[in-house]
Image (tube, rainbow, N blue to C red):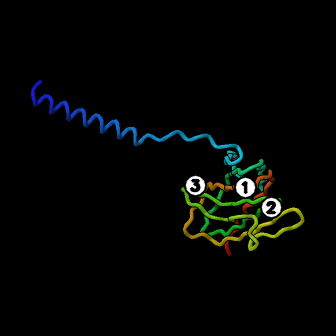
Amino acid sequence: MSRYSRGIAAIWLVVGLLLAGTVGCTRQAPTPPATPSTAITPATTARTQPNGVPRRLRLPAGPVAAQFAIRAPAPPSHSFTVRILAPRQADVAVWLQTWYGQRLDVLGSTHDRASCRAAAEQTVCLLRFPRLEAQRAGIWTVHAAKRSPRPAFVQITVTFQPAA
């Protein structure tokens, strides 16, 4: 074998080792399945909830998430309220997601004393939002994420009203 051929063979060997090392370094280990106690289970429905009609969500034991669709009229000309009813022991966060990906935080926790009041065995949260000049009408998604361990029924009502 000539000196030139050995040099080419050595280059190909180095290139092959570099490629093999790169593939090995970029490969990700498989993600182990989440345990049932910490898994977030999505629960979606295809129908759009009518304006001002309460939606009752059954949230099973453990951390769990659920969502449903609403039709948002033109936010620059409408204000809206969100009313949340949950068991006192439940810790639930609620947010809205527009059809174009904008997240609108509604409530970080049903234990928030500034927005929620305990009434018997229920927590009632009432949040009022002004007109949203930068947002657009369309199908939005209401998300609820329960972090507390016990199952809960949570009722969420989103009501849009023409701004005065």
* Mark 3 vs mark 2, CA separation in Å: 25 Å
Q: Identify which amino acid the numbered label 3 is placed on.
A: Trp
Quickly name the residue at label 1: 146
> Mark 3 packing: few (<14 Cα in 10 Å), some, or many (20+)?
some
Between 92 and 99, the residue placed more toward the observer is 92
Name of the residue lying farthest toward the bottom: 164
Horizontal relation, residue 2 to residue 20: left or right? left
- Classify mark 1: helix, strand or loop: strand
Image point (60%, 69%), residue name = 132
Relative to 63, say whether 8 is above or below: above
Tell me which numbered mark, 3 or 2, is placed earlier along the sequence. 2
Horizontal relation, residue 99 to residue 129: left or right? left
Where, quadrant-wise, is the C terminus in this rendering?
bottom right
3 or 2: mark nearer the eye: 2
User: Residue 112's spot in the image, x, y percent?
Assistant: 74, 69
Numbered label attached to residue 85:
2
Image point (50%, 40%), residue name = 29
Quickly name the residue at label 3: 99
Quadrant of res 13: top left
Q: Identify which amino acid the numbered label 2 is placed on.
A: Leu
Quadrant of res 18: top left
1 or 3: mark nearer the eye: 1
> Mark 1 packing: few (<14 Cα in 10 Å), some, or many (20+)?
many
